[in-house]
Image (cartoon, rainbow, N blue to C red):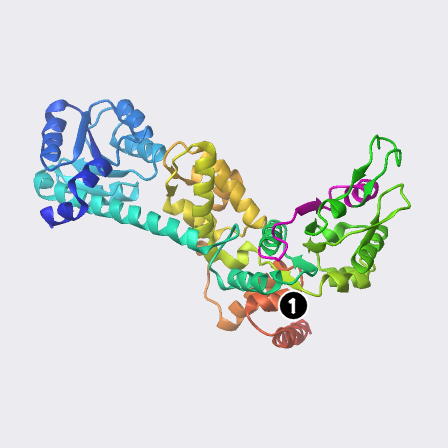
């Protein structure tokens, strides 16, 4: 494999990518290694001062460290730990005095890429560095492909390729062409406003205005003024006449977020707008005509709210003639790598950073987490990590404390694992999904991929078995 891999990578790419620092106790031990690497075409430096190596490492000078086990203070193990903390993506090769399986296993366990005894240095170092060069090239190609994939899979600001989100894309395309009201349902932070904007961009009135109002952020008097406008002197502080969002966006779209938080009196006024296409400014008897498309969004079950008397049934049916359900991030876990790549690019550009990715253990934490805050929470995590990361790769220590604490949970679960019958695994999974859906059986059946009737039948069977055991 000697020069074949190097010629595949190309001298320029190899020199730029695989810069090596040899860290040892004395120049007579490190300089011969560096000279050999230079002859092979690598960029190589030497130092007997660990702090100097760490400082250069943090600046992104090196991709590989060769560390001699004879290194003085703080010792090669402590230096290895600090190097991995400074740059979790660094490749560390430990150079030992003699062959030792025990030392090799210990070095790899503590994060080293490989252990090479001094007697095998000439034979193995070039081979290992070529492997690393090939791996770095492969990673670079994968990053390029991921960026291309994200660009191809971005749908008007929404990124994903899971069946759940592709179904949303398809429904948006079908509905957008009709100038009619739409109800978007989904958990907080799942991207309902992005869906609303996509509906507007693909609609016949895309060139018209798109206005947003959060119904939960304003008390009734301010919400009415915001939507309908007011005349001068209508209330304390109304020093001038102002049009509301319905007038402002006439001919376009008004997005009413958190519609489930709207009071019943405001719901009655909104119903009149939908039915008669007319509004009255606060404090004015004049009726004004408007032509708008209303897109409403909620994280509540409006059918349950109607039954509880907290939401008008006639308004619900007016809004929900066309409905789009946005899945939670837990329902589209396979989209997390794409979303991470999308947010990395976004916040690298915003903050002027060059964060290249996440370490494998950080990726594992993100994939195991339940994401109660959905895509918005993931975006906040990546935004913060890009801003604070000290190396070119985001590691667990760059994640929020609650995610860092979640890291060891997998090992705890593994220790608590015990063999159980398959039927018990099925029961536990269904119970957990129901808890996740707060008892909403319709949504639980959708996540489980079974019909509602099948779920009800199974729950009745489970209830009978529980009653039988309790007797």
- Is any part of residue 119 visible from this angle? yes
413 w.r.t. 346: above or below: below
Q: Residues within 10 Å of mark 1 (few under 14, many from 20)?
A: some
Front in this rendered view, residue 215 or 226: 226
Instruction: Name the residue: 65% across, 58% down.
Output: 185
- Along the horizontal axis of the image, is 329 left or right of 317? left
Where residue 391 appears, x then y in whole percent?
37, 34
At mark 1, the secondary structure is helix
For label 1, the residue is 442
- Quadrant in which the C terminus is drawn: bottom right
Where residue 237 appears, x then y in whole percent?
84, 30
**Residue 225 drawn in magenta:** yes
Where residue 467 appears, x then y in whole percent?
68, 73
108 w.r.t. 75: above or below: below
| Residue at the limit of the structure toward the right, as seen here | 285
In terms of image quadrants, where is residue 354? top left
Instruction: Name the residue: 87% across, 32% down.
Output: 236
């Amino acid at each position: 494999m000697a020069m074949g891999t190097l010629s595949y990578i190309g001298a320029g790419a190899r020199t730029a990518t695989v810069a090596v620092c040899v860290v040892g106790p004395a120049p007579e031990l490190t300089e011969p290694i560096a000279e050999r690497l230079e002859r092979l075409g690598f960029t190589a430096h030497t130092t007997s001062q660990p702090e100097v190596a760490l400082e250069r490492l943090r600046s992104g000078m090196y991709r590989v460290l060769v560390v001699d086990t004879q290194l003085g203070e703080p010792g090669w193990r402590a230096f290895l730990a600090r190097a991995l903390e400074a740059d979790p993506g660094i490749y560390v090769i430990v150079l030992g005095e003699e062959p030792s399986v025990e030392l090799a296993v210990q070095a790899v366990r503590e994060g080293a890429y490989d252990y090479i005894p001094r007697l095998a240095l000439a034979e193995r170092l070039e081979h290992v560095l070529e492997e690393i060069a090939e791996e770095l090239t492969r990673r670079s190609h994968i990053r390029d492909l991921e960026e291309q994939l994200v660009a191809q899979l971005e749908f008007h600001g929404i990124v994903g390729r899971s069946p759940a989100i592709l179904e949303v894309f398809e429904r948006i395309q079908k509905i957008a062409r009709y100038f009619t009201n739409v109800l978007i349902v989904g958990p907080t932070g799942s991207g309902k406003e992005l869906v609303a904007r996509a509906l507007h961009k693909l609609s016949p009135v895309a060139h018209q205005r798109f206005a947003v109002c959060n119904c939960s952020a304003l008390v009734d008097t301010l919400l009415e003024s915001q939507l309908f406008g007011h005349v001068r002197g209508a209330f304390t502080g109304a020093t001038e006449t102002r049009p509301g969002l319905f007038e402002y966006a006439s001919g376009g779209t008004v997005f009413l977020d958190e519609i489930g938080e709207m009071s019943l009196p405001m719901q009655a006024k909104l119903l009149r707008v939908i039915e008669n296409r007319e509004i009255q400014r606060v404090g004015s008897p004049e009726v004004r005509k408007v032509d708008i498309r209303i897109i409403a969004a909620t994280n509540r079950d409006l059918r349950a709210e109607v039954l509880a008397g907290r939401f008008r049934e006639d308004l619900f049916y007016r809004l929900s003639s066309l409905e789009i359900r946005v899945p939670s991030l837990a329902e589209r876990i396979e989209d997390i790598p794409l979303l991470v790549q999308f947010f990395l690019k976004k916040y690298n550009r915003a903050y002027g950073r060059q964060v290249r990715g996440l370490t494998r253990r950080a990726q594992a934490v993100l994939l195991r987490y339940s994401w109660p805050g959905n895509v918005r929470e993931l975006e906040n995590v990546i935004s913060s990590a890009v801003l604070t990361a000290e190396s070119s790769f985001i590691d667990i220590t760059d994640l929020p404390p609650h995610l860092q604490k979640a890291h060891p949970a997998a090992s705890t679960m593994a220790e608590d694992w015990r063999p159980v019958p398959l039927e018990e695994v099925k029961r536990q999974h269904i119970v957990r999904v129901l808890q996740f859906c707060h008892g909403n059986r319709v949504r639980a059946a959708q996540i489980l991929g079974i019909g509602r009737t099948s779920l009800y039948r199974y729950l009745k069977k489970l209830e009978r078995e529980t009653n039988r055991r309790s007797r």
